[in-house]
Structure formats: C-alpha cells, structure tokens
Image (cartoon, helix red, strand yellow):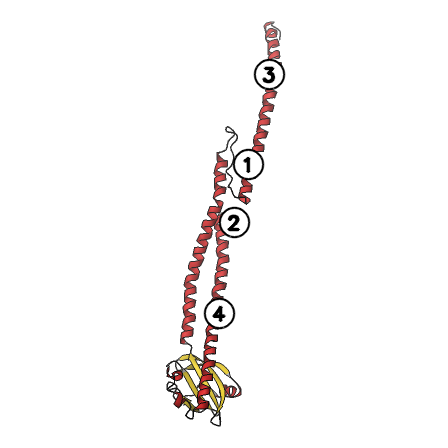
C-alpha cells in the first residue's frame, strides 16, 4: 500500500479504474459465455422436441416406421439422428448413420418409457444431445429417440470464449488508456494553477490563479485559493503600512535626539 501511495495520482486512479473494469469485463464475459451455452442448449432442446413430435406422428401413421419416413427431409439430413427402440431396447428402425447400435442405455431406456427424457451421450467420436419420448404405435410401446450433434454448439461456445479472451484484455487496455487520458485532461487545470502559483511573488501584486469555467471541485478550489491570495495581499499591505508609519513616527524623535547630541559632543563632555 505504501508503494501505491507513492505513485502519481493519475497512475493510482488509472490502476483502480482498470481493476474495476477488469472485474466488470470478466463478469460480463462470464455471463455471455454461460448465457450462450444456455441459449444454444434451449434451441437444441426445442428443435429436438419438434423433431420428436414429427417422428412420432410419422410412425403412428406409417406401417414401416422410419424405413418409410427415411425419404422424408426429416431424416435425409446427415446431421439428424433418429431411432426407434422397443421396450427391450432393440432397434426397430433407425436413420442410416446409426445402424443397429441403440442410442440409449438400459437405465436411460427405463426413464424414457416413463416420460420424455433429455440426456447427453456420445455418438461415435462426438457428443450429442438426445431426447427420448415414449410413443404407442403399431400396438407396441416404443421410444422415439432424436438427437443433434453438439459439435457446432461446442465450437460456437469455444469461439466466443476465444473472442472474449482476446477482446477482453484489449477492451481493458483501451478503457484504462481512455481513463488515463480523461484523468490527465481533468487534472490539467490543477497543473496550470500550480505553475501560476510558482510564478507569483510579492513584487507583482494582484496576480491570481487561473480558474476553470466549470463550477466543480477544481473551480471552487481555484476560487478559494484566489480569495486566500487576496487576504494575504491585504495582510502584507497592512504590514507595509504599519512599518511605514512606525518608521515615520521613529524618524522625528531620532532626528531631534541626533540634533541634541551633536552640540553635546562639541562641548567636550563625556
């Protein structure tokens, strides 16, 4: 703390401002980072619920399940994952990319048979967000599973994190620089008053400090210092008047004493 107190005022205020801005920027960055992940998860969930409803409606109307709906745009997109499982976990139908590997584990299948379940699982080498919901079709209790890869979602979050890590320090540096420049401009009237105060001397009375036009703390300080200078000049003027009067009052009796001493010295007396 003692070292900090020895720093110039502009540096200290800039450091405090930069610290506060760092906390604010970190908080905003963390909020945006987490918020983006939440919003992307919400979008994926809404999309999965819509797709699960579409797939459920298709298999309720079709006899061949996804085999018949495989020509639909719902399953032609390569990134779409869709699968139908029976109550024992066997694959009834699936999009071509999934083949015969069930997307749900036994515990996840049991939860899905009881109600709609959202979970995250790995599909191949990538993670995926899955939604499983029970459907009764073809006189069977089935589970419709739809999924979306998380690669794009994770990449978007990583890109935002990288942008924040790069842009955050740059924004902090610019904010600190702007604060330093603004503080320097705000303290410029103080420096001007200091230079004028250093040049004031008693040989040139009537000099005053430059007061900025703004009615703020610095302006009031300049006005107060000018009033103090006026009082000091009045005090010095009274002192000079007193000295002049005193010297005048002493000059007459000293002259009389001097005139009396000169004849006395000529008389030879001691």
Give the residue number, with chain letter if any, for mark 2.
5
Sequence order check, earlier mark of 4 and 3: 4
Residue 261 is situated, as x and y percent measured from the top left of the image, at 61, 10
Image depth: mark 2 or mark 4 in front: 4
Q: Is residue 104 visible?
A: no
Residue 252 is situated, as x and y percent measured from the top left of the image, at 61, 14
Q: Residues within 10 Å of mark 1 (few under 14, many from 20)?
A: some
Q: Secondary structure at mark 1?
A: helix
Measured in 3D between alpha carbons, the distance from the residue under mark 4 to the one under mark 3, in whole angstroms, is 92 Å
Give the residue number, with chain letter if any, for mark 3.
251
The correct choice, above or below, for 231 with respect to 19 in the image is above
Sequence order check, earlier mark of 1 and 3: 1
Measured in 3D between alpha carbons, the distance from the residue under mark 1 to the one under mark 2, in whole angstroms, is 29 Å
Q: Quadrant of residue 247?
A: top right
Furthest residue toward bottom = 139
Q: Secondary structure at mark 2?
A: helix
Q: Residues within 10 Å of mark 3 (few under 14, many from 20)?
A: few
**Image disc number at residue 226:** 1
């Amino acid at each position: 703390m003692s070292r900090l107190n020895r720093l110039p005022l502009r540096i200290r205020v800039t450091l405090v401002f930069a610290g506060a801005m760092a906390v604010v920027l970190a908080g905003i960055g963390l909020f945006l980072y987490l918020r983006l992940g939440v919003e992307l998860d919400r979008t994926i969930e809404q999309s999965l619920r819509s797709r699960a409803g579409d797939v459920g409606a298709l298999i309720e109307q079709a006899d061949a399940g996804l085999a018949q709906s495989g020509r639909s745009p719902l399953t032609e997109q390569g990134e779409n994952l869709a699968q139908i499982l029976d109550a024992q976990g066997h694959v009834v139908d699936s999009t071509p990319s999934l083949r015969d590997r069930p997307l749900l584990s036994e515990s996840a299948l049991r939860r899905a048979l009881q109600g709609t379940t959202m979970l995250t699982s790995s599909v191949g080498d990538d993670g995926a967000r899955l939604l499983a919901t029970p459907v009764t079709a073809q006189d069977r209790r089935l589970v419709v599973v739809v999924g979306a890869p998380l690669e794009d979602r994770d990449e978007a979050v990583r890109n935002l994190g990288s942008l924040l890590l790069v842009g955050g320090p740059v924004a902090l540096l610019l904010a600190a620089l702007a604060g330093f420049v603004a503080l320097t401009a705000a303290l410029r009237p103080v420096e001007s008053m200091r230079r004028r105060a250093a040049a004031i001397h008693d040989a040139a009375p009537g000099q005053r400090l430059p007061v900025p036009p703004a009615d703020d703390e610095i302006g009031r300080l300049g006005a107060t210092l000018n009033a103090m200078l006026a009082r000091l000049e009045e005090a010095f003027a009274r002192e000079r008047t007193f000295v002049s009067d005193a010297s005048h009052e002493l000059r007459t009796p000293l002259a009389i004493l001097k005139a009396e001493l000169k004849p006395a010295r000529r008389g030879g007396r001691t």
